Amino acid sequence: MDLTGGVGARSGGGGPCREATGLESLHLGDEFRQLVTLPPENAGGFTALLELPPTQAVELLHFTDSSSSQAAVTGIGVDIAPPLHSFGTLAFPSNSVLMERAARFSVIATEQQNGNVSGETTTSSVPSNSSANLDRVKTEPAETDSSQRLVSDQAVENQSPCPSQNNRSGKRKEFEKKVKSSTKKNKSSEETEKLPYVHVRARRGQATDSHSLAERARREKINARMKLLQELVPGCDKIQGTALVLDEIINHVQSLQRQVEMLSMRLAAVNPRIDFNLDTILASENGSLMDGSFNGTAMQLAWPHQAIEAEHSYHHRQLQPPPPQQWPFDGLNQPAWGREEDQDHGNDHNNLMAVSENLMVGPAHLHPNQVKMEL
Amino acid sequence: MQPTSSMKEEFLKKWQTGLQIFRPSIDNTNVTERKKAIKLSADVAMASLRKGTTCWSRALIQKTAAEDNFLVRQMLSGIKAETLINKKLPKKTVCHRKIVRRSKKILLRRSRSASEEAAAKAKKLVKRRTQGLRSVVPGGEFMSNDVLLIQETLDYIVSLQTQVNVMRSIVDAAEAGIER
């Protein structure tokens, strides 16, 4: 289908007019009645119309052109308007709006007539589509106010007291963008619905070309994220300046990573077999685990082999700590480690006592030669 | 945005399964290898919390998979290990050094006012810090834009805090067990 078919379909909307003036063919009139009952934004109706033989469509086109009294028919947008006006009961969504903006659509229409149009979808969808666009453009500034405040900082809040001017200018800008995109990219109505918007407004004196708008949006996004980060990192919320904040963040991440290293080292050193009974811990100590404090009762279950090891290899103990060059972290942690060892030695008797208890309760799976292997 | 208790529980469960997988191979090893195993399993557990939705977790899984493929595969058996391990990271942006240097020279040639110079210096500082952040966060060099980098850093910090909290409570408990 080409342009003429589309235009024919369009002009079909005014079918009953023609009936009144006296159109001959009966079956055509029936078809028109069907069409009138269909809402015009329904694309299926148009495609149904488009299935008319092209000669008939052209005929109809010529007929309407001659019958309609309006002289200045430059494009489709204006072409639709007269039948609409004469036929009020038709279910077009926003008649007044269309009439109001008919002049603007002449831009689209002329461009399309120049030969940008490729298929029937655009020609048929332009009027309903653009009316939807109009509605959206009208409603948009109201919804954007809330969403924008999330992303941007004071820039928006500064503007919100005087929304009328900005809204209007923004509306016009967006409308122009819309028109451009619809004429250039030839999009169908669904695609324009999905089009993502970047809601940016310029303060007075700020640049308004697309590059600086995008850059500003990006910066605002980054600032919002940075604020979140500042809240997350302790002691970071009082620092001014991006570089210092980033420094602090890097330090924090590195310290966390080092803590993980250190904790896993401690765990490895403390517990020769790491399959301690986390299940029992979880079952009994669920609440206190989250607070970071344990009662030792559950750990006793998980700890028999440690005690046994102490019993077996008391005299080998001095050799067991790893050589100092293996420690990935500096001297701060080493004293703690040494203290721990001392406590181990000192508590040996207690451990021996504990073994007898623990053997009854917990499963002690330890091969005697494992201790030797560890050396 | 503090780590939630549900996250901690999930992490603990995953970590435990990782340790259990490790158990036979760990029994007869020395402290350093045990430590490595513990850290690897903790890392994988942390990364698998995000189920591959974030860039850093994917990078971390890939890194650990390079070290111990078997463990990672076992631990991720629930959530399509193959796709996670082999998932492609976004492409690294590489710029030609010579071209960059030449353009910098051209930029330097222009005489600038004091305020411009200060702004340029601040920009340079921030850029260097951003590079530092990239090198700290796993997979940071793949995050091409700054917004993504900061977002991922946010998520990574929360996960790290979860990991540290859980591990600390476990270690404290373990050492309390020794002292007893």
Image (tube, helix red, strand yellow):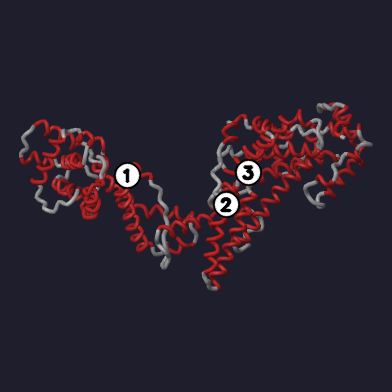
Measured as percent of width and height from the top left, residue A361 is found at 82, 27
* Marked residue chain, label 3: B
Residues packed near mark 2 inside 10 Å, few (<14), some (14 to 19) or many (20 plus) = many
Secondary structure beneath dot 3 equals: loop
Q: Which residue is mark 3?
A: B4
Q: Which amino acid, mark 3?
A: Thr
Q: Which amino acid, mark 2?
A: Ile
Measured as percent of width and height from the top left, residue B16 is found at 70, 33
Residue drawn at x 88%, y 39% is A320
Measured as percent of width and height from the top left, residue B154 is found at 59, 49
Q: Which residue is mark 1?
A: A187
Q: Between label 3 and label 1, give the one nearer the viewer.
A: 1
Residue A271: numbered disc: none
* Marked residue chain, label 2: B
* Residue B86 in sight: yes
Q: Say left or right for B47 vs A18.
A: right
Residue drawn at x 57%, y 33% is B83
Q: Between label 3 and label 2, give the one nearer the viewer.
A: 2
